[in-house]
């Protein structure tokens, strides 16, 4: 065993230890004080060993991805790889969701008392509802919004209202929308990594993006859809810079704006966008006019929203009040400030912990730390650029953590950031062994716990 592999295993072991400590201390706090409001800390879940109709498919997808994933990622033509990655991610997410059955795993998730489908009838007059939206955020106001509607800008519930308007109403269609769109997130990350750090690193990252433990929650949460929108905003920005395309820049801006109106927390994607601009500064100097359609796109939805009567900043401040009125005001910051990171370990897996260790070496251009990695043949520049992208995502996640507005349930809330940590696995050797660890973790989580999302 090489010195570098031992260090990878130490990083994965430290991540596992963090999860173990979070479980043990969390169970003690919840048992003694009942202030965590999760039954299987640090994740919102119940201990419930079970199998279901999706189990055989999930096992088959996992085995196929481990055995054939690295080979196909290396050999398929690029466009075929993107289609295969999306299809495999879709199969992985859906099969894991179906372990809990169609209703509990897919159709019933978005119809709970806190979810979006409960309020569709209140959007019969969309302009009037937007003007009145902020009046129902805080608890104690007349007819307050359910928790998730109050906790997000109106583009989130409006998505499901529009699906209902075109005949795709109900939990089944809503769930499949989130799964199908959410599965494209891995494709967006691959596109961005290829544009910014090179195709070889993108190909090495592909199996890890497809077989992520995050799929356990991507199949049961609207946050998978939010994550995909934010990921495509970054991907289009990377394409706009590398191809010096005004249309890609405008599209990126529109998606960045939409992301901010799907979730307040996605404003932190500005840090990832800034990293892309830094990496593409040479191209930007060659065509600085790219900033104009980008900024115009970003501003479009806020301007339309303001004209429609919705004030984003007012809504956010009211959300903070609502957050502390509920369990967010009771959950202890001192526990969640680090237990949230344990949730991140569970959605990104041990391979990402090892990959982040190597990311630090690539970021500081320590050649020796990467000589045993397959990425060494790509040169220092590509690895450094990938490390910058991953580090920006990690920084955004840490800012979200320090804010105190993400105490618990980050296994779904931080899905958008988790997608951008997974490419760190491109630095790893022995990819099949690490992919196996990722798949086993996801299968254990899905079959031992009954997740709340």
Image: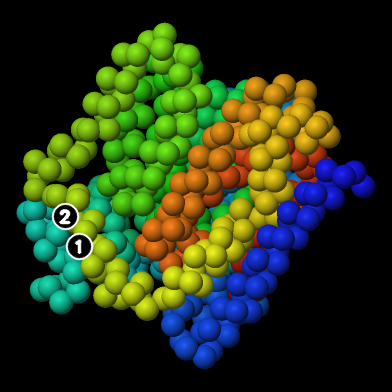
Q: How many marks?
A: 2
Q: Residue at x 69, y 29 (%)?
A: 365
For disc 2, the marked residue is 314
Residue 288: x %, y % from top left: 35, 13
Which residue is at the front of the view, 316 or 438? 316
Which residue is at the front of the view, 167 or 5? 5
156 left or right, relative to 356: left
CA distance separating discs 1 and 2: 6 Å
Specify few, some or many for label 1: CA neighbours under 10 Å numbering under 14, 14-19, or 20 or more.
Answer: some
Q: Residue at x 19, y 49 (%)?
A: 312
- The answer, for residue 349, to whether it is visible in the render is yes
- Provide the secondary structure element on which disc 1 rests: helix
- The answer, for residue 244, to whether it is visible in the render is no
For disc 1, the marked residue is 318
Residue placed furthest toward the right: 1
Which residue is at the front of the view, 213 or 341? 341
Specify few, some or many for label 2: CA neighbours under 10 Å numbering under 14, 14-19, or 20 or more.
Answer: few
- Provide the secondary structure element on which disc 2 rests: helix
194 left or right, relative to 275: right
Residue 341: x %, y % from top left: 56, 60
What is the basis of the colouring in this image? rainbow
Which residue is at the front of the view, 106 or 116? 116
- In the figure, 217 relative to 32: above or below? above
Question: Are the residues tagged 1 and 2 within 8 Å (C-beta)?
Answer: yes
Residue placed furthest toward the top: 286
**Which quarter of the picture shows residue 125?**
bottom left
- In the figure, 350 relative to 31: above or below? above
């Amino acid at each position: 065993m090489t010195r570098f592999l031992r260090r990878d295993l130490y990083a994965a072991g430290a991540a596992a230890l963090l999860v173990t400590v979070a479980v043990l201390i969390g169970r003690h706090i919840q048992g003694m004080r009942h202030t965590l409001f999760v039954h299987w800390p640090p994740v919102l879940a119940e201990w419930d060993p079970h199998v279901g109709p999706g189990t055989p498919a999930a096992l088959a997808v996992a085995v196929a991805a481990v055995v054939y994933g690295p080979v196909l990622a290396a050999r398929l033509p690029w466009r075929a790889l993107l289609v295969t990655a999306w299809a495999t991610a879709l199969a992985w997410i859906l099969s894991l969701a179906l372990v809990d059955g169609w209703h509990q795993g897919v159709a019933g998730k978005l119809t709970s008392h806190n979810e979006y489908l409960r309020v569709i009838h209140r959007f019969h007059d969309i302009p009037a509802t937007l003007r009145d939206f902020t009046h129902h955020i805080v608890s104690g106001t007349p007819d307050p919004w359910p928790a998730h509607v109050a906790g997000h800008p109106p583009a989130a519930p409006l998505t499901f209202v529009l699906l209902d308007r075109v005949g795709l109403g109900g939990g089944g269609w809503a769930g499949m929308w989130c799964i199908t769109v959410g599965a494209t997130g891995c494709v967006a990350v691959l596109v961005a990594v290829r544009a910014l750090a090179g195709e070889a690193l993108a190909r090495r990252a592909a199996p890890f993006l497809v077989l992520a433990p995050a799929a356990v929650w991507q199949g049961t949460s609207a946050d998978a859809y939010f994550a995909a929108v934010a990921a495509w905003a970054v991907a289009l920005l990377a394409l706009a810079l590398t191809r010096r395309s005004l249309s890609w820049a405008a599209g990126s801006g529109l998606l960045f704006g939409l992301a901010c109106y799907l979730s307040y927390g996605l404003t932190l994607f500005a840090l990832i966008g800034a990293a892309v601009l830094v990496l593409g500064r040479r191209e930007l100097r060659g065509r600085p006019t790219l900033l104009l359609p980008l900024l115009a796109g970003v501003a479009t939805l806020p301007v339309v929203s303001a004209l429609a009567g919705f004030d984003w900043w007012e809504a956010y401040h009211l959300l903070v009040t609502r957050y502390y009125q509920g369990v967010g005001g009771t959950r202890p910051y001192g526990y969640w400030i680090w237990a949230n990171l344990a949730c991140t370990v569970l959605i990104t897996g041990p391979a990402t912990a090892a990959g982040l260790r190597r990311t630090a070496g690539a970021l500081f251009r320590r050649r020796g730390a990467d000589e045993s990695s397959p990425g060494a043949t790509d040169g220092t520049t590509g690895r450094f650029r990938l490390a910058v992208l991953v580090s920006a995502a990690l920084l955004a996640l840490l800012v979200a953590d320090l804010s105190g507005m993400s105490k618990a349930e980050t296994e779904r809330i931080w899905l958008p950031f988790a997608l951008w940590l997974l490419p760190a696995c491109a630095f790893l050797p022995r990819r099949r062994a690490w992919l196996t660890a990722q798949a086993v973790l996801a299968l254990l989580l899905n079959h031992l716990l009954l997740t709340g999302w």
